[in-house]
Image (cartoon, grey):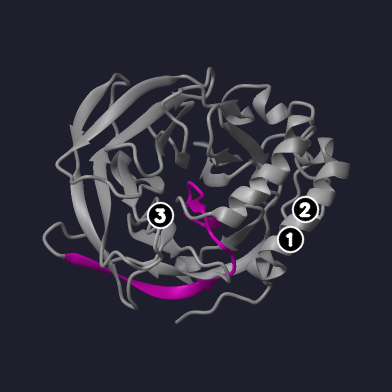
Amino acid sequence: MRRRSLALLAGLLLTGALASAPAASATDGTGDEGFTIKDPRITESSGLAASHLHPGIYWTHNDSGDGPYIYAVDSATGKTVAKVTLTGVGTPRDVEAISIGPDNQIYVGDIGDNFDGRWPYEWIYKLPEPKKLVDQTVRATQYVVKYANGPRNAESLIVHPKTGRVYIIDKKEDGGHLYEGPATLSSSGANIFKPIATVDLWATDAAFSPDGKQLVVRGYFGGIYYDWNGGEIKREGRLDVPLQKQGESVSYSTDGTRLMYGSEGSDSPVQAEDVPGGSGKSASSSGSSASGGGSGSPVTGGVKTGAIAVGVVVLALFGLRRLRRTPARRH
């Protein structure tokens, strides 16, 4: 989104600290060890989803102002290996999220609202994940999205990997809500999304674990993970989100052992952390802590002195209330 003045200011403050930090191991390796998106066309990567058909490939897209495009990025090189143009849809307004559901169906969330409630409806686009990674045009199905309690801004769209049900988390500075869509989306009328639980974060993206048992939600400077429990979400702890200039996306790796965190900007990094609970790959260099009490990622460790000072400014700007510890409530 364009109206992120506080976040951008904080991002500028972080830039100095990050620029002087040693390179993180998350970008030293390949695949689930992290990578850098090198395509000059991708300057506002706002969503991220691990391919189901092509190991090591991550799908992403630009924020508003690009077009009906998604990009397949090879995590081994950071290079784009396919640009897919969506047909059968209108002109996108503010594409903010991407998720892959059952049967290898890609869902693209045109759900951003720069005016926080101006648009009476938003859209979801669904298309089959291409079997071949070449530049191509794919016909998509367009779904109209409305909210039971009125228009709102959102940047997080998630599709449950087992049921295929679509969920959206709205973006509110003081915390938002998890919205549940119909059991089956309809292309012939509006799909009403209803709030079912509170989410204690200014959410910029979210993701389901491959087994559908865990939900992670990230913001610019923090994150929370929940036990899914059929939508009766239960907060389990804080995520160890790496410091990024403008943290916009998160995805589980295909095998579910890592969380991949993306950021907007040219040559934007995608950084890897172990999943909460220590069930990921070896954390010998990452030092990740699901509760946020550990030493943090290599980036945070490498810039501790500067980042702590910056963090104070950031928290003063944004307030601690975004990461309130109140339990999730159903509505």
Secondary element type, mark 3: strand
Asked if residue 80 is positioned above or below residue 238 in the image, the reply reads above
Give the camera-side residue of 68 and 49: 68
State the image coordinates of residue 93 (x, y, percent, origin top left). 30, 49
| Residue 210 appears in the picture as rendered | yes
Residue at the location (22% across, 45% down)? 91
Please count the marks in the image: 3
Secondary element type, mark 1: helix
Q: Give the residues in magenta.
A: 190-216
> Distance of mark 3 from mark 1, alpha carbons?
26 Å
For residue 176, side relative to residue 113 (left or right): right
Give the camera-side residue of 278 and 331: 331
The residue wearing badge 1 is 315
Residue at the location (76% across, 49% down)? 289
State the image coordinates of residue 164 (x, y, percent, origin top left). 32, 54
Look at the magenta stretch and give its main secondary structure: strand
Residue at the location (82% across, 35% down)? 302
The residue wearing badge 3 is 157
Callout 3, which amino acid? Leu
Asked if labels 2 and 1 touch by Cβ distance under 8 angstroms, the answer is yes
Mark closer to the chain start, 3 or 1: 3
Tag of residue 311: 2
For residue 100, side relative to residue 205 (left or right): left
> Distance of mark 2 from mark 3, alpha carbons?
28 Å
> Distance of mark 1 from mark 2, alpha carbons?
6 Å
Residue at the outermost right position: 305
For residue 310, side relative to residue 55 (left or right): right
